[in-house]
Image (cartoon, grey):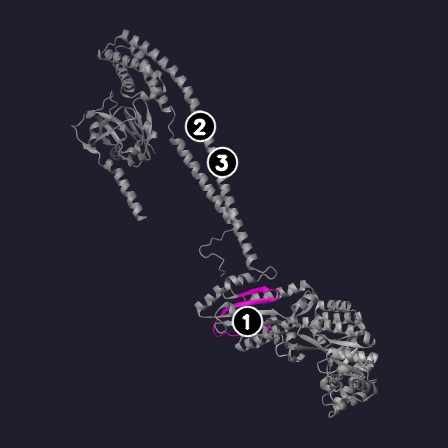
């Protein structure tokens, strides 16, 4: 029994290793433009790109269900973003895009794996043409458990607001 | 306890618990299955749904761009309309340029035709936008027209494909539901099977229990049976050895069980067995004391006891088993003889113990019933001797080693020989010695050999008596002794009538001599057969009168013909006036009852004189004649009948028939005729 649980722990550790081992990245400070607005308890809080990137940049190489080939993104961990906003313990948050596309991201998505809020692609800051200024990336190659059909619509870009759910 | 019962973990399995467990298990299974099916449903890929969703967004984006263009047409100089147009264009750009549309194309092939046209429109709008304010209205109008067409085309495709997807989804939903029902059905069948199996399993257990009961238990009493004992006795002995204790083996045999059966019926007999079984069951203790019915009226107790508790159990059982029982309103006397042998004193293996306990039981029976005897080596030698004797008698019966001699009886008033008593002798084939009845009759009486012996004597006597018929008068009667045991046997009466029929001997020429013992035992069977014998016409004499414990009561109740005064009363007749008075009294009693009296064992003249003086009817004894072989008797009778001279047998006759006997004319003539 002990051996078995130890083995399980080892497997889990191996599974979470890539998440811990996301490659840190650093770039020159971005402009202090508003990336998105956070709706917390009815109050709008603007979050700038600069504030975001101070949380610590990581580099992720992944495939995407919407785009062809391997893509390289840089961004901050969604978990860190929510932590800085005090929303880390919520059951879910709602992300709204510029075109009013809305997705609810559940708690386990940012605790189970390294869910990334990308600000850059191939080192370049995301613009509106490149689905920016921020988009949500599920690192499918580092964390294959994210590769489920139900998570496919949660790849949200052109993020306008993050709303806390109670 | 029983070796047959498997040891180890045993769940108290009943129908209720089994069905309950099966039902709960099935319910859990069903719930789990439905939950997993729901999960499967929710995580199933939405057939084509994703493609149509993407397509819908694409239509929305393009429609939005068309709307923004028509707005900008109305206000070509407004910065706001430029921004809005730019944003809408970016959305379309992302949707058609950056997003990989291959999946949508594979589902909606028309999408492939739309993509280049939209991309072209986006490029042209980029050019218009980069030109800055004011916007070129002509280009916007052309683009608006182009997009209008594209939207129309896309909407057509959307509705067409949407219907397909709807139908697809509906059918998949139906098949999924059907799948659910199939699973539920399968589970129901499975749980039914499980319940059925459980029921069958329990049924099997019950059957095994029943079979075990049938195999190991006696049906009448519910006690363990012989088979159980055979299967478990060695294990019990082993346990005794391990514990260093004593194994007591008690064999119990009911006394007179057959007569209870015959008197009150088998129903009461069964009740008696049950009553005894109850007593035995009350001393039963699981694993230590086992009560067994060996069959018939035989029981056994196997008890593991401490070394010093010697005869407690046997004595207790003897006290409880002997007494009267009230069965169906009848007072039934219960008696049981018990024989015990113990391990390790009386044998180290079961068969020896059984044999020795049986010997002890045999002795208990022989010592007078209702006894309790523990085995000892002395018993064994005694029994061996008896068994040897019995075997000898059996052999003698088979080899016809018994023969009859005849003791004449004389009427004292006339001196005539009026009858003769058949006496049995055994000639040893090896030594040629002749053995007197006293040496083998008691042994035969202890076993059932006496029945055969009596039958044999009766048959031989009747055959002989029939031969004498032509040379004797009607009054000449042959007497045959019969034991009480024979009289109680059903077959005896049949044998008697059959023998009379075969030999052609008239019943009036036969007299059976019975003893007082039959009245003491007061057996209904015996008394009934006494009555039946009288009805046939065979007369009855009461042998050995005055020697036993006879009461006079039955003399009045039973229709006897003759009393025979026991030889012990005549032995000191001359010296004892008391004995003279007793004999006198018996003669008077017999006279008053209308019975004839014959004195046995007349050995001297003084006795004969006394009897003649007291008007005793008849006498037999050595003084007149010893018992003679039938050849001599035949010769004498023939001579008496026809006055035939018997020269060749003269010498022999003189030694046998006493010439001194001259008390009256007839006897003298008898002697003279022999002398001549």
| Magenta highlight range | B290-319
Q: Residue B585: x percent and y percent?
A: 78, 86
The kind of secondary structure element at disc 1 is: helix
> Where does label 3 land, which residue?
B185
Residue furthest top as drawn: B138
> Where does label 1 land, which residue?
B357
Q: Are marks 1 and 2 on the same chain?
A: yes
Read off the chain for label 2: B
Q: Answer whether residue B614 is visible to the viewer in this image.
A: no
Contact flag, marks 2 and 3 (Cβ < 8 Å)? no
Residue furthest left as drawn: A28
Contact flag, marks 3 and 1 (Cβ < 8 Å)? no
Instruction: Give the Cα distance between marks 1 and 2.
Output: 85 Å
Asked if residue A39 lies left or right of residue B237, the reply is left
Is residue B361 covered in magenta? no
Read off the chain for label 1: B
């Amino acid at each position: 029994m002990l051996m078995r649980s130890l083995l399980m722990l080892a497997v889990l550790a191996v599974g979470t290793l890539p998440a811990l081992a996301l490659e840190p990245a650093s770039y020159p400070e971005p402009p202090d433009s508003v990336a998105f607005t956070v709706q917390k308890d009815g109050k709008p809080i603007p979050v700038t790109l600069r504030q975001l990137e101070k949380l610590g940049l990581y580099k992720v190489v992944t495939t995407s269900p919407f785009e062809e080939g391997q893509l390289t993104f840089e961004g901050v961990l969604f978990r860190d973003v929510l932590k800085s906003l005090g929303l880390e313990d919520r059951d879910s948050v709602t992300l709204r895009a510029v075109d009013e596309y809305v997705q609810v991201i559940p708690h386990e998505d940012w605790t189970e794996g390294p869910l990334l809020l990308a600000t850059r692609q191939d080192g370049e800051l995301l613009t509106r043409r490149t689905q920016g200024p921020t988009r949500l990336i599920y690192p499918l190659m580092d964390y294959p458990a994210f590769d489920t059909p139900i998570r496919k619509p949660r790849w949200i870009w052109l993020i306008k607001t993050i709303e806390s759910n109670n | 306890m029983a070796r047959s019962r498997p040891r180890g973990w045993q769940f108290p399995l009943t129908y209720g618990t089994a069905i309950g467990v099966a039902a709960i298990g099935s319910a859990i299974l069903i719930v789990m299955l439905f939950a997993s099916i729901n999960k499967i449903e929710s995580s199933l890929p939405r057939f084509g749904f994703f493609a149509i969703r993407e397509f819908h967004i694409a239509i929305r984006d393009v429609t939005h761009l068309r709307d923004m263009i028509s707005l900008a047409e109305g206000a070509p100089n407004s910065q706001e309309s430029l921004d809005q147009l730019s944003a809408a264009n970016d959305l379309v750009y992302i949707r058609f340029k950056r997003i990989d549309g291959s999946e949508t194309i594979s589902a909606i092939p028309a999408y492939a035709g739309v993509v280049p046209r939209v991309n072209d429109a986006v490029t042209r709008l980029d050019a218009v936008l980069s030109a800055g304010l004011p916007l070129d209205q002509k280009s916007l109008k052309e683009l608006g027209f182009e997009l209008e067409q594209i939207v129309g085309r896309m909407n057509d495709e959307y509705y067409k494909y949407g219907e397909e997807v709807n139908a697809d989804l509906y059918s998949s939903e139906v098949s999924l539901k059907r799948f659910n029902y199939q699973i539920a059905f399968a589970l129901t069948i499975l749980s039914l099977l499980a319940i059925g199996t459980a029921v069958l399993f329990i049924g099997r257990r019950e059957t095994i229990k029943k079979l075990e009961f049938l195999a190991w238990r006696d049906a009448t009493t519910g006690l363990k049976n012989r088979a159980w004992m055979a299967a478990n006795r060695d294990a019990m002995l082993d346990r005794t050895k391990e514990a260093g204790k004593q194994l007591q083996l008690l064999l119990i045999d009911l006394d007179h069980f057959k007569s209870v059966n015959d008197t009150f019926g088998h129903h009461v007999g069964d009740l008696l067995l049950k009553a005894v079984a109850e007593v035995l069951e009350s001393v039963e203790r699981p694993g230590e004391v086992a009560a067994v019915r060996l069959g018939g009226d035989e029981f056994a107790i196997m008890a593991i006891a401490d070394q010093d508790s010697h005869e407690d159990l046997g004595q207790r059982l003897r006290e409880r088993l002997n007494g009267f029982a009230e069965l169906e309103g009848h007072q039934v006397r219960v008696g049981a003889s018990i024989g015990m042998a113990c391990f390790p004193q009386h044998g180290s293996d079961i068969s020896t113990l059984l044999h020795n306990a049986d010997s002890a039981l045999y002795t208990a029976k022989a010592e007078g019933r209702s006894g309790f005897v523990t085995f000892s080596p002395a018993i064994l030698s005694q029994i061996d001797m008896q068994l040897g004797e019995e075997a000898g008698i059996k052999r003698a019966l088979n080899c016809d080693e018994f023969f009859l001699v005849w003791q004449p009886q004389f009427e004292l008033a006339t001196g005539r020989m009026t009858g003769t008593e058949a006496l049995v002798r055994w000639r040893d084939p090896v030594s040629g010695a002749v053995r007197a009845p006293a040496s083998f009759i008691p042994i035969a009486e202890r076993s059932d050999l006496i029945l055969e012996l009596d039958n044999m004597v009766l048959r031989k006597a009747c055959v002989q008596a029939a031969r004498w018929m032509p040379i004797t008068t009607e009054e000449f009667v042959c007497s045959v002794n019969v034991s009480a045991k024979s009289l109680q046997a059903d077959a005896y009466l049949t044998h008697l009538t059959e023998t009379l029929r075969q030999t052609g001997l008239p019943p009036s020429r036969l007299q059976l001599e019975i003893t007082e013992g039959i009245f003491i035992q007061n057996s209904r069977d015996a008394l009934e057969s006494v009555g039946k014998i009288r009805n046939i016409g065979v007369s009855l004499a009461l042998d050995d009168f005055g020697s036993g414990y006879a009461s006079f009561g039955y003399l009045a109740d039973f229709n006897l013909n003759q009393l025979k005064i026991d030889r012990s009363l005549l032995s000191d007749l001359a010296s004892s006036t008391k004995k003279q008075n007793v004999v006198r009294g018996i003669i008077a009693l017999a006279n008053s009852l209308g019975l004839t009296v014959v004195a046995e064992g007349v050995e001297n003249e003084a006795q004969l004189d006394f009897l003649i003086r007291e008007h005793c009817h008849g006498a037999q004894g050595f003084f007149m004649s010893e018992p003679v072989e039938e050849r001599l008797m035949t010769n004498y009778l023939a001579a008496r009948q026809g006055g035939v001279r018997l020269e060749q047998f003269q010498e022999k006759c003189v030694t046998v028939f006493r010439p001194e006997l001259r008390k009256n004319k007839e006897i003298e003539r008898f002697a003279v005729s022999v002398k001549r």
